[in-house]
Image (spheres, rainbow, N blue to C red):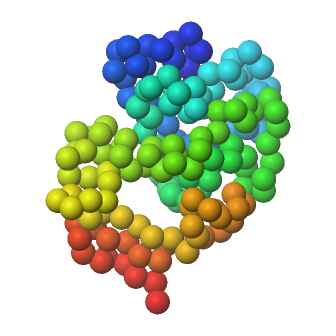
């Protein structure tokens, strides 16, 4: 949780926000009652931070959470639980676009570990660390995203998993 007045400080002080989108899935069922409506303005404020120009990194918080990248991506773009439930009080405007969410787990993650010259994007000269899924993250209906599964994982240019 971030006070909305402090969001700009992430940019001004070059602070990297490490967020775990899946926390918003479970927390939406109890956070409004525990925090109160006014404090929710800075809760899971991915879009506000991104729009302000802050670097936001997505993580899984495994083993506290499942560690499933598809659930993390879904949570960032849908801002709903796995059954599709949410409420207007959960600040749907804080959901990210699919392009913004992808950046949390790729380019921004590489930047946060000082490895943006070798990781984070697919381009010549960089290490090939990537996963491919059975669902197209950029076009699939939101509800289908967490139903997918990994079909290929490449680490440092080597195929380490391939679903047949």
Number of marks: 0
- Spot occupied by residue 22 in the image (x, y as percentages of width and height): 59, 46
Q: Residue at x 44, y 26 (%)?
A: 53
Q: Residue at x 31, y 37 (%)?
A: 112
Q: Quadrant of residue 126?
A: bottom left
Q: Quadrant of residue 94?
A: top right
Can residue 41 be seen in this snapshot? Answer: yes
Q: Residue at x 40, y 19 (%)?
A: 11
When the figure is inspected, residue 100 is found, relative to residue 31, above or below; the finding is below
39 displayed left or right of 116: right
- Spot occupied by residue 106 in the image (x, y as percentages of width and height): 38, 50
Q: Residue at x 51, y 12 (%)?
A: 6
Q: Quadrant of residue 57?
A: top left
- Spot occupied by residue 5 in the image (x, y as percentages of width and height): 56, 10
When the figure is inspected, residue 118 is found, relative to residue 2, above or below; the finding is below
Query: Dividing the image into 4 quarters, which one contains the N terminus?
Result: top right
Q: Which residue is farthest top?
A: 5
Can residue 61 be seen in this snapshot? Answer: no
Nearest to the observer: residue 35 or residue 151: 151
51 displayed left or right of 92: left
Q: Which residue is farthest left?
A: 125
117 displayed left or right of 153: left
When the figure is inspected, residue 42 is found, relative to residue 87, above or below; the finding is above
- Spot occupied by residue 122 in the image (x, y as percentages of width and height): 31, 59
Q: Which residue is farthest bottom?
A: 164
């Amino acid at each position: 949780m971030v006070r909305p007045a402090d969001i700009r400080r992430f940019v001004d002080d070059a602070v990297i926000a490490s967020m775990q989108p899946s926390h918003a899935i479970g927390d939406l069922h109890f956070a409004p009652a525990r925090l109160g409506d006014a404090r929710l303005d800075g809760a899971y404020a991915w879009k506000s931070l991104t729009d302000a120009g802050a670097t936001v990194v997505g993580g899984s918080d495994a083993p506290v959470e499942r560690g499933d990248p598809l659930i993390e991506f879904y949570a960032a773009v849908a801002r709903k639980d796995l059954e599709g439930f949410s409420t207007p009080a959960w600040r749907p405007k804080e959901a990210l676009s699919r392009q913004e969410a992808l950046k949390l787990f790729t380019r921004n993650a590489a930047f946060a570990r000082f490895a943006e010259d070798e990781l984070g994007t697919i381009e010549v000269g960089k290490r090939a660390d990537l996963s491919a899924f059975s669902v197209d993250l950029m076009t699939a209906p939101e509800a289908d995203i967490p139903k997918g599964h990994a079909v290929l994982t490449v680490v440092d240019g080597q195929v380490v998993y391939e679903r047949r």
